[in-house]
Amino acid sequence: MAFTFFFRDLPVIEKAAEHAVEFASGRMRFKVWDAGCALGQETYTIAIVLAEKMGKFAFKNLRLHATDYDSANHFGDVVKAAVYHHDELKRMPEGILEKYFEPADKPDHYRVIETLRNQVHFEYHDLLSCRPIGTDFSLIVCKNVLLHFQHAERVKVIRMFHEALLPGGFFTTEHTQQLPQEVRHLFEQVTPNNPLYRKR
């Protein structure tokens, strides 16, 4: 799904990051899955928020998996290159552009710094396969994707996310998406009016 932008739904991402960082404190590996990452704006937003909350030493333990199905549009090449036009970076909070981006070879383009790029690992993945890319995730983010699926498909994909999470791990989605009745018993909502859920 290609529609997204940097720092979209920032309060949701910040709350998810806050809980996940606390949950993963002391672990050798902090695994996060951004499912449906499109061109990487959301992925690198997550990476920046986590870097701000974790500090340099702890951030090295992060492995941020970014996946999308749209190989026809070469999303993976864009995510790995991590080069974006200046117009896409105008929503950045003050100081973030200077701290986490550097001028790219193309005029008016900036590249995500290597420290962040090294923690992001992209692969093509079809969520409707219902096969997780791994296990033991502390946080799974899936925004602007589930609303495109049929009800039964959403149920299956959320069950897959539940299986991929560590016990007590977190899942967040769109504000407009409520958990289907069939999977509500698998999670508890962390805070009211925020689509952040903890695996039971």
Image: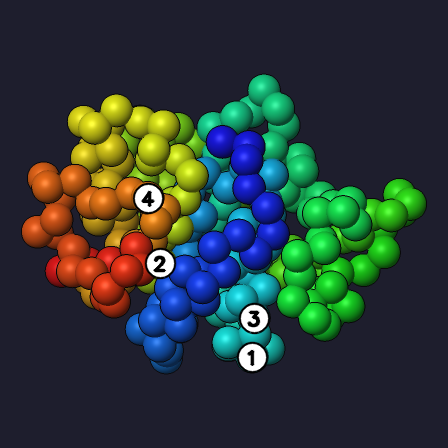
| Residue at left offset 21%, top offset 28% | 151
Circle 1 sits in a helix, a strand or a loop, which is it? loop
Distance, label 1 to label 2, CA atoms, is 18 Å
* Callout 4 crowding tier (Cα within 10 Å): few <14, some 14–19, many ≥20: few
Circle 2 sits in a helix, a strand or a loop, which is it? strand
The residue that disc 3 covers is 51
| Residue at left offset 28%, top offset 60% | 193
Mark seen at residue 118? none
The residue that disc 1 covers is 55
* Callout 2 crowding tier (Cα within 10 Å): few <14, some 14–19, many ≥20: many
| Residue at left offset 36%, top offset 28% | 148
Distance, label 1 to label 3, CA atoms, is 6 Å
> Residue most toward the top?
72
Q: Nearer the viewer, residue 145 or 63?
A: 145
Q: Amino acid at mark 1?
A: Gly
In-image side of 115 versus 171 (left or right): right
Mark 4 or 1, closer to the camera: 4
| Earlier-in-chain disc, 4 versus 1 | 1
- Residues marked 4 and 1 touching at CB (< 8 Å): no
Circle 4 sits in a helix, a strand or a loop, which is it? loop
